[in-house]
Image: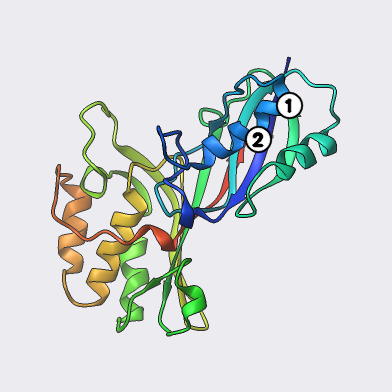
Amino acid sequence: MSRYKITIQYDGTNYFGWQMQSHKRTIQSEIETALVPLNNNKRVKVIGAGRTDTGVHAFSQVAHFDLDTSLKIVQLKNAINARLPDDIRIIDVAQVSDDFHARFSAKRRYYRYQCYLGDILLFKNQSWFVGEIDESILDVFAKKIEGTYDFLSFSKSNKHLKNTVCNIYESRWFKSENMLIFNVCGNRFLHHMVRYLVGTMVAGAQGKISLDYFIDLLINPQKNVKIFMAPPKGLILFGIDYDK
């Protein structure tokens, strides 16, 4: 039995997120279904680095599974892809040590959120059409996130989660033509955290909340704060770092 690390790209538009759900299409369930014929028609449990929500995309999601196979790496990659729908693709397969864990071995996670200022419909599934916005203030908000904070105010309430502190190493906005892009890197992210941060920053850039209020939510974390949440379609899990 060997452990394999896979890197996956997917368009999450037609899926109910990463995690397996009864009677719903998810990324995990599609990959596990593709692996069944390669494991004598038995389930292979696939463990992802993070649980992306319904409609969220991935440029470089990571997962691992254990499999007893005589297939070479390239053959295994091709065999899985041949059984996957065309909006999910395995872009890399590597054999790793048994102590590798896609979630717990991860050191840094990178997310990207795309806000579109134009009206070209081709960007509809991969970005949030935000309309009028003061672009200059977005990065002012973003820089306040860098550092170590309790992000309870910017997460979905979870009574079982005791630790809501995250280290944010990079947080910045930049513009590429009509696309406003938010890049953020951290050791971990809470449920809906990036979407809450983006939604609140955009609200600030539209004059709906103040920078002081945003800072207060960081310094004085609160449960179930009524703030703004960006839609899932603009969010992309962009990459994950592991120790070499």
Q: Nearer the viewer, residue 78 or 209?
A: 78
Left or right, 192 with reference to 242? left
**Kind of residue indicated by mark 2:** Ala
Vertical comparison of 5 with 177: above or below = above
**Kind of residue indicated by mark 1:** Leu
Q: Nearer the viewer, residue 196 or 10?
A: 10
| Secondary structure found at label 2 | helix
Residue under label 2: 34
Between the residue at mark 2 and the residue at mark 1, the CA separation in whole angstroms equals 8 Å
Identify the residue at horizontal 21%, vertical 58% (top origin): 215
* Residue 91 locus on image (x, y percent): 71, 48
Vertical comparison of 85 with 199: above or below = above
Return the mark for residue 204. none
Q: Quadrant of the N terminus?
A: top right
Residues at discs 2 and 1 in contact (Cβ within 8 Å) = yes
Instruction: Choose top left, top right, bottom left or bottom right for residue 224.
Output: top left
Left or right, 13 with reference to 191? right
